Image (cartoon, rainbow, N blue to C red):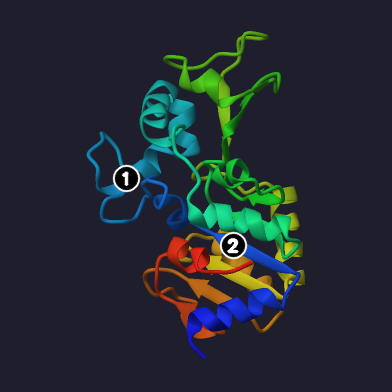
Amino acid sequence: MAAQEQLQSWIKNSENIVFFGGAGVSTESGIPDFRSVDGLYHQTYDQPPETILSHTYFEGRTGDFYRFYRDKMLCLGTKPNVAHLKLAQLERCGKLKAVVTQNIDGLHQLAGSRTVYELHGSVHRNYCTQCRAFYGVDFIAQGEGVPLCPVCGGVVKPDVVLYEEGLDQDTVEGAVRAIADADVLIVGGTSLVVYPAAGLINYYRGNKLVLINRDPTPYDREADLVIHDSIGKVLGGIEV
């Protein structure tokens, strides 16, 4: 049986699917990732992105952090692609139980997905570091310099997990439960080299692990089905 047909069969016969996705899901909407040839790591800036997007850099050079953050991380005009839309459709049909994502762009929710575990946070949520007042993404996008809380004057920080910071424990626990209980786990658009997020797929206990990625991953040998192709092309071909 061809790989696409096998995937179609598993999806048709399952009502407990979980999708685990990475940057490759968003690049098909035009959002650059960090490690691709055309990604942020290969663009000229005063520091590499992994340095700028660190807790130390945010604390010590907050103004420079926000200059980069507004320039490179806020892709607010971006629309969901066929992969996002298909996953939302699968959820509406009662087949997909959760999306676990490493992305911070909110495109899964914009496409209509409701149960989304955002491992690395979201650009759409921002909090005052002092009084914890909440601010939406426009508060950051439309401002200049370091955003300060109108309530108390504290620095407002995006609710994204920076380098040197740990993942939110409640989000991780929810993702682990969903993955562990899944009949079918579809992993797409991720190289599976970013930890601890990538390690979460080890909690899957089933026998229908699907890996969809343009390039090989360290988990290919452990998967029950591997498809090296565009995540949008593969999921777009699924009939619901």
Which residue is at 66% across, 61% downward? 90
> Can you give x and y, in whole percent of width and height, for residue 175 in the image?
70, 58
Residue neighbourhood size for the residue with mark 2, other residues' Cα within 10 Å, grouped as few (<14), some (14–19), many (≥20)? many
Q: Answer above or below: position of 122 versus 224.
A: above
Residue, disc 2: 20
Residue 218's label in the rendered image is: none
Which residue is at 54% across, 82% downward? 5
User: Image quarter for residue 152?
Assistant: top right
* Sequence order check, earlier mark of 2 and 1: 2
Residue at the outermost bottom position = 1
> Can you give x and y, in whole percent of width and height, for residue 197 in the image?
57, 59
Which residue is at 45% across, 77% downward? 227
- In front of the other: 110 or 182: 110
Residue, disc 1: 40
The amino acid at mark 1 is: Leu
- In front of the other: 60 or 67: 67
**Quadrant where the C terminus is found in the figure:** bottom right
Residue 223 visible at all: no
Local secondary structure at mark 2: strand
> Can you give x and y, in whole percent of width and height, for residue 136 in the image?
60, 24
Q: Mark 2 or mark 1, which is nearer to you?
A: 2
> Can you give x and y, in whole percent of width and height, for residue 97 in the image?
73, 61
